[in-house]
Image (cartoon, grey):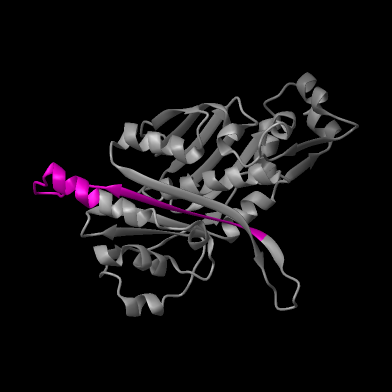
Amino acid sequence: MSEPASREAIEIAVPSDDVVMPFQAEQADVLGRLVKLGPTVDTILSRHDYPEPVSRLLGEAVALTALLGASLKSEGKLILQASTDGAVDLLVVDFVVPGSMRAYARYNETKLADLDKDDDAALLGHGHLAMTIDRGQDVDRYQGVVPLEGTSLADAADTYFKQSEQLPSFLRLAVARHFQAAENGQGAWTWRAGGLLVQKLTREGGIVSPKRFEEDWTRAKSLAETVEDHELLDPTLASERLLFRLFHEEQVRVYRAISLKTYCSCSRERVGEMLQRFSGEELADMVVDGELWVSCEFCNARYDFDPQEVVSE
């Protein structure tokens, strides 16, 4: 366990992106995680030509999955999937321990054009949010499912915490485009995302009165609610410094940060093996204008094959 964060330590902290920072506010007996995403979320979103509202919603899903996946202590995968009847009918995010991520979204252009694109609840519509923990072939999967009933992703996640973990929780997610200046004066717009999750725990080995429990949680939640979106997204504001700003009165203690990066498991070899499972007639139906190709939903990589060679195998 690390020492409580001090003002001196915060002042010399080096800002960093693509990390989840676990922490504990000892006075209030709360645990939490803070995520700040830069190049990782920008890479995931920039691989697809999503409309901005879809990118923002998928960015929130990536931040949420990072906060949840960082709690896994051993090998495994956390899969977040939202299936809905809304304009964005599918969101999928994978988190592989210790911190590899990939994601994609599927949307209906017609429905999207008819909606208020700043209303995430309308983008999602009705359906369900599933969170699956896969620890490998020898361990049973765990899955928690909560309804999406015209709610935002954060609201659905809050329902999940209440039903599955039964802990008082606070969650805030933020996603926006950020102008990154370059030395040549040009610069570019890039995606950023951030999130804060705080949960109340009971004291181990002791008894805490209901009144004290409620007072501690009310105080910690009130502090967490002061966080602004721009603080979660600011690339110059280090995670340690933000946590000290929010919870220094509660003796905040930070733990080793978890680094995040993008990944994809697709390859030409794996796609070729997948194609071999289809019959010659099915493969022939896949040929369009003399071309046979497969595009990865996650990384958008395209794999081209010779139709004559594939169909004849």
- Would you identify the image quadrant in which residue 181 lies? bottom right
Judge by depth and name the residue closer to the eye, 143 or 134. Answer: 143
Q: Is residue 200 magenta?
A: yes
Q: Quadrant of the C terminus?
A: top right
Judge by depth and name the residue closer to the eye, 198 or 305. Answer: 198
Q: Is residue 185 visible?
A: yes
Q: Percent position (x, y) of residue 145?
A: 42, 28
Q: Residue at x 58, y 51 (%)?
A: 263
Q: Percent position (x, y) of residue 256?
A: 35, 64
Is 311 positioned to the left or the right of 52 in the image? right
Segment tinted magenta in the rendering: 190-217
Q: Residue at x 25, y 49 (%)?
A: 217
Q: Quadrant of the N terminus?
A: bottom left
- Would you identify the image quadrant in which residue 116 lies? top right
Q: Percent position (x, y) of residue 114?
A: 71, 31
Q: Residue at x 86, y 31 (%)?
A: 308
Q: Residue furthest top?
A: 281
In the rendered view, would you say 146 is above or below 260?
A: above
Is 157 positioned to the left or the right of 254 in the image? right
In the rendered view, would you say 225 is above or below 276?
A: below
Is 232 positioned to the left or the right of 199 in the image? right
Q: Residue at x 40, y 57 (%)?
A: 226
Is 142 positioned to the left or the right of 54 in the image? left
Judge by depth and name the residue closer to the eye, 224 or 255. Answer: 224
Q: Is residue 202 visible?
A: no
Q: Percent position (x, y) of residue 267?
A: 66, 45
Q: Is residue 139 magenta?
A: no
